[in-house]
Image (cartoon, helix red, strand yellow):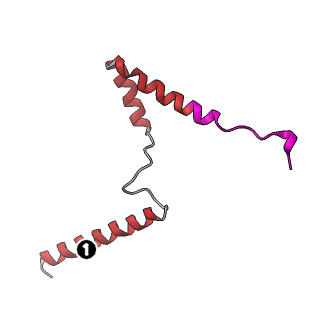
Amino acid sequence: MPGWVWIILIAAALYALHRLALRAEARGWIYYMKSQGHSTRAGSAMLEVQQLLEPSKKHVLEMKRNQRGVTDDQVEPPDPDNAA
């Protein structure tokens, strides 16, 4: 087979995988094109370094830390008096 046929076959296979991944993402099975915006460890480390170089970025770190604390504090423990 000529080389251009292989290129077309590979392109078609990649497109099919792309469409399959989009369908899986629409069903909620994976995150492919649209991420949830969660931060990574490397991103947090770079933000710490950036804070040292640019002190004006300190408020971003404080906001991230406060958001983590708020989400942890929002969950209330079950009330033992109303146990079923």
Picture residue at 25% right of the left edge, 74% below the top: 12
Image spot of residue 25 (x, y percent)? 43, 62
Circle 1: is it few (<14), some (14-19), or many (20+) Cα within 10 Å? Answer: few
Q: Which residues are magenta?
A: 69-84
Q: Which residue is mark 1?
A: 12
Asked if residue 7 lies left or right of residue 60, the reply is: left
Image spot of residue 45 (x, y percent)? 41, 30
Q: Any magenta on residue 32?
A: no
Image spot of residue 10 (x, y percent)? 24, 72
- The residue under label 1 is which amino acid type? Ala
Q: Please tell me whether residue 51 is drawn above or below residue 45 in the rendered image.
A: above
Q: Quadrant of residue 59?
A: top left
Q: Any magenta on residue 76?
A: yes
What is the count of numbered marks? 1
Q: Quadrant of residue 7?
A: bottom left
Image spot of residue 18 (x, y percent)? 33, 66
